[in-house]
Amino acid sequence: MAEATDPPRETFRLSQLLYDARYRSMTIQVVAAILIMLLLVELVDNTVTNLAALGKDIRFGFLWSTAGYDINQQLIPFTSQDTHARAALVGILNTLVVAALGCILATIIGVLAGVLRLSSNWIVAKIMTFYVEAMRNTPLLIWILIVFAVMTEATPQPREFREGGSASMILWDSVAISNRGVYIPRPIWAEGSGFVVAVFVLSVIGIFVLRHIARKRQQDTGQILPVFRLSLALFFVPTLLAYFLMGRPVTLETPELGGFNFAGGLQIRNSFIALWLALSLYTSAFIAEIVRSGILAISKGQTEAAFALGIQPNRTMQLIILPQALRVIIPPLISQYLNLTKNSSLAIAVGYMDVRSTLGGITINQTGRELEGMLLLGIFYLITSLIISAVMNLYNSSVKLKER
Amino acid sequence: MSAGRTEPVAFVRRDMLAPAAPPPGQVGVIRWVRENLVSSWFNAILTALSLYAIWYVLSGVLPWTLNGVWNATSLNDCRAIRDARGLESAACWAVINERWLQILFGFYPTDDRLLATLFNAEALAAAGGADAVFNGGLNATQRVEFVSGMKNELSNGLIFLFGYWRPLMALALLVVAVAPILYSGLPRVMLWFSLAFPFVAFFLLWGGSVWLPILVALGLVATVLIGRAVGARFGMLGGTIAGLAAFLVIFMNPLSFLGVTGLFPLLPKVLSVMDSILPWGLTAIPSDQFGGFMLAIIIGTSGIVLSLPLGIVLALGRQSSMPLIKWVCVSFIEVIRGVPLIVWLFTASLLLNYFLPPGTTFDLLLRVIIMVTLFASAYLAEVVRGGLAALPNGQYEAANSLGLDYWKSMRLIILPQALKISIPGIVNTFIGLFKDTTLVVFIGLRDPLGLTNAIRATAEWNGIYWELYIFVGLLFFVFCFFMSRYSMYLEHRLRTDHR
């Protein structure tokens, strides 16, 4: 009978650092840490030496000096006497506005195209396939340039809108598409319009409350409220009532042709339209594919099971298919939004004044602070994308299948 | 019942009747139309709307395209021809006909000497022979005159085939090199050529001494061989150190910190010796003359080839159990992905010189290739990570229980499956990379879109847009479409699950 013995006492040998899996990871990390440190030291050292040789230093004070250039699209007031920091802010807002509008339009077109591509109608499915493949396999830059060329070359000049000219305004003489931009009516907010807006906001909140109540009521009693019709009524009726009660405080100022150009109204520059449309069309092709694969990912058995339970088709879509499909669709959709936001930096192709053109372009050229400017620009994009990823992670964890 | 049955059966069918034809509405075209176009009133409306939309687009585009003017020397010329034919709108394809070489190759120089020898022998002889014309007999102005006179006589097709034989041959060899990787039916020996291809392509495109690529290749082979030989005798650590030492001695100067400079690296010394013995080579062409679609292919191909291994390593690093490695990889991936490529390209062109040792100059094209590679590898890392995460844990555990070490288990068990899952994502990243090569126009490289601007800036073609954009767009489309179809084929071929 064998005697039970203690396991042999371990003695640590130096070779274990290399050949023993327990210690090896430590060795590797120490070596990696040393190498990374060396690399960083080398980079910083090089940068300091190079900057010193050029007589430069790293300071961010330039942000508070006068910018001295104009920005042709401003959401907040800006003159050339304002600071570089404010110019950067104007650029950031321009980036965000084109990204936000782009995301909205891309989602609308993309969902439509994705659903139509699955249509049982052969022609419609083929047209959508053609659209998606054409968009996805050609560089975005070409689309931006093409849309810009359409906006500037194929649209009439403002003087064509005169009496007897070849062009005319559309939508009851309120919108003019010219090669200097698109002119749309501008709302004039008179006294009392605040009340109308407040009513509108409240009724939108009311719609959400209504949906909540309806869901609760259905779960408690099984009765189904006509949510859609009630929401529609809630959306229009109170606001319109308030509008007429206050004596129609919000009016529209339509663009008028005066002299060589349009006066009044709101001018949307061609650069903005080109960037917005091209970004939306391009991204929508990717979104269409995401939507299509999301719908295809839900097995047909789900629909059949719902029908077998006697659930109506539209409620099947709403209660069974969409919640499952959205789990597949939303994460890549959000990363497409992220791509769109980053792609908006292609504004450089059409001269749209986004943050890269102001902070990362003219400001750098005027102050010679390329290191600081690029750093700030990178940080802006990084923060934006980290925020979007954080939203995505939140969503992912909220819809994750709860198992075991 | 049957037993007492005596009377004969009246009728027994001996042969089957032919099946009746289906009703006419259920066969052929009619059925197809019914099912696919007009299955419901809503579908019928959709069909009508689609047909109208197709007709509307084609009625505008087709006449414009088909009636296009192919032979003209300027846009005004085009318009004159169009008006003379009494057409309302016609494309001016003449700009493509005239300038397609420029869109493909930018300002990459043609091999004028070969062109003159082949097609202009008499004029060449009259001017005193090839050596006299191209090696000093004529001054620069006269030579330019001679060459442009010759080129005016030659067709674009001939110039394409013989004047640009170097990039063309590089492209043809690229196809040969890529074929065994893309299609496993070809003999495996061809993979050796795939390995050698980068050096061949470098020599063909950039020219210079033939010995430089050969010696670099030999140096790398020597590094690997020395490392392996020592490794077989003294273990992995010894092999790595020996290989590293060999690499340093051949390509760098390991003694520079001691101030000893004359001894190493070995490469330039051997190079100068070989050059003096056998001075073979092609005319050297600096990177700033590269352009056109060729540039997109060069950047795209190098980016694709280099970013895949880097992306895989980053993905593995992100999954690593070592916190430091994981942390470094995560921050690298997130920082690269969080910032648009344009900003990285501007960084490469504006800032890279700050980070390099003082006095280093760095080819802009090389900087762009490095940036594009880093950018694509961060995206690839995320795609591969998805594939790694999709594998069930049992695969990792099975590999461990077989006693495979980390690299073996990755190479033999995990990566083949993970990469197979991520093929669509990988190819999509490659397509994105290839499309993104157009962005280099903003830092002053002459990509196809930049060349369309250059063409538009000339007096003859001022104001021409659509034809150029369509041509460039089609070029990109063909390549990207091929890639996406190939990924579908690969997915299909590698599918091993039960269908």
Image: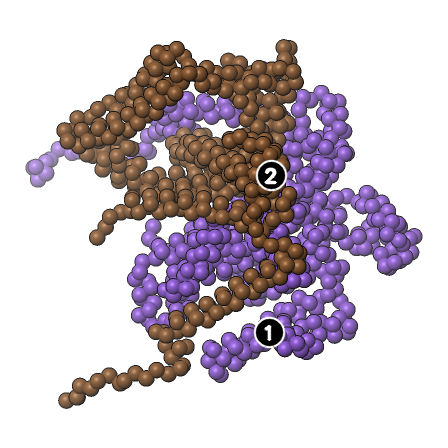
Chain colours: A brown, B purple
Which mark identifies residue A66?
2
Q: How many marks?
A: 2
Question: Is residue A393 visible in this depiction of the protein?
Answer: yes
Give me the chain letter of mark 2.
Answer: A
Question: Along the line of sight, which residue is nearer the eye, B368 or A352?
Answer: A352
Say what secondary structure mark 2 lies in. Answer: loop
Q: Quadrant of the N terminus of chain A?
A: bottom left
State whether residue B38 appears in this view.
no
Q: Which residue is disc 1 drawn over?
A: B248
Eyeballing the image, is B288 above or below A146?
Answer: below
Horizontal relation, residue B483 to residue A335: left or right: right
> Which element carries disc 1, helix, strand or loop?
helix
The quarter of the picture where residue A239 lies is top left
**Other residues around mark 1 within 10 Å, as few (<14) / some (14–19) / many (≥20):** some
Residue type indicated by callout 2:
Thr
Q: Chain of mark 1?
A: B
Query: Which disc, if any, is residue A45?
Result: none
Looking at the picture, how far across and down is residue B380, in whole percent? Answer: 47, 54
**Of discs 2 and 1, which sits in the foreground?**
2
Tell which of A135 and A256 is nearer to you.
A256
Question: Which residue is at a point 66% across and 24% down the rendered structure image?
Answer: B89
Q: Residues within 10 Å of mark 2 (few under 14, many from 20)?
A: some
Q: Is residue B251 above or below residue B346?
A: below
Position in image of residue A50 (x %, y %): 63, 59
Measuring 71% from the left and 38% from the top, which residue is drawn there? B455
Residue B416 rendering spot, x and y as whole percentages: 41, 61
Res A271 quadrant in image: top right
Q: Position of residue B362 (x, y in %)?
A: 65, 59
Amino acid type assigned to the residue bearing label 1 in the image:
Leu
| Residues marked 2 and 1, same chain | no
